[in-house]
Image (cartoon, grey):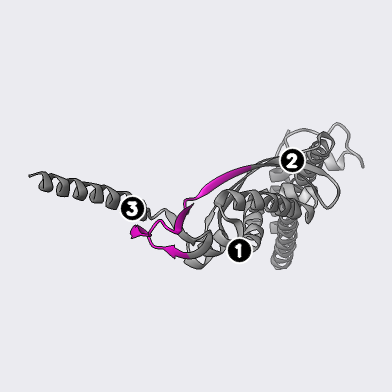
Amino acid sequence: MKSKQVTLGVLAVLAILAVAIIMPSLHIVRTEDAAVVRVWGVVDRVIPPGLNFVFWIPNTVDRFSLQVREQTFAFSAYSIDAQNISGYITVLYRLNPTPASIKTVAEEFVSLDNLESRIDGVFMEEIQNVFALKTALQIVEQRAILSGEIRERLSGVMGQFHVIVDNVAVESIQFSRAFEQAVEDRMITEQARMRAEEERDIALIVADQQLQVAGLEAQAVVVAAEADARALEIMQDAWGDLGAEVRDIMLRQLLINSWDGIMPRVVGGGAGEMQFIIDAMGITD
């Protein structure tokens, strides 16, 4: 009985030792992490996501997050025309998940914190370089595409650090008060110029329309004059075939139709003209 108890005790100790040895060697790697095995401190390999057995002597396991990280930079820079610019830019980035990149980062930087300390300065330098290639006015006018340009430049540089830049957002940009006033004055001048051009275009359109109307009216006058002349020719041709008595009657009728009903106050040439009007109207004593 005593021997059996000793055996059970030994087995229990062995089980405890086995658990103490095995448990530290079991490593669960999440899909949003990467894990690197070091042998006596030297990077050996990258283990896949899931449950992995890595004997804890002489191995250690370091983890690197693959999740997207967000960093906001308060920057200060100068444009190509020496205008001071300041503001805030947010960068979203993550570690390249390929095993080769993870292994290289582990070898060169040991930890993700060391890598971020290194790339923070590079981020700032490249942001300043983008602004240094533009005039202050270009920065104002190209604000909508500025984030894309910074992202493209950072992506090209961060490749050597095995970092992927997902997005860049320019949160705010401030200029000196003198420059902001100059931009405001320029905008006011530009708006005044645009209004003047618009008013000029409207005036040209109105003038063109007036010319067209005047041309049509002049054409109408010419047509009317030609019609009157033609009518006169026809009348002259027709009267040439009439007798003197008929022409006299027609002349009297024309005179009556054209008279405004007001007797003239002054009649030149004696009483003959007055008598002609009386005769034409058929007035008798």
Q: Please state, as top left, top right, bottom left or bottom right, where the C terminus lies in the image.
A: top right
Q: Which residue is mark 2?
A: 86
The answer to which of 14 and 137 lies nearer the viewer is 14
Residue 60 is a magenta residue: yes
Image coords of residue 214 (percent x, y): 75, 53
The amino acid beneath tag 1 is Gly
The amino acid beneath tag 2 is Ser
In what element is the residue under mark 3? helix
Q: Which residue is mark 1?
A: 159
Front position among marks 3 and 1: 3
Front position among marks 3 and 2: 3
Counting other residues with Cα less than 10 Å from the Cα at mark 2, is it few (<14), some (14-19), or many (20 or more)?
A: some
Which one is earlier in the sequence, the residue at label 3 or at label 1? Answer: 3
Residue 212 is a magenta residue: no
Report the magenta residues as a range: 45-72
Which one is earlier in the sequence, the residue at label 3 or at label 2? Answer: 3
Residue pushed farthest top?
265
The answer to which of 60 and 153 lies nearer the viewer is 60
Q: Residue at x 82, y 38 (%)?
A: 185
The answer to which of 11 and 234 lies nearer the viewer is 11
Q: Which mark is residue 38?
A: none
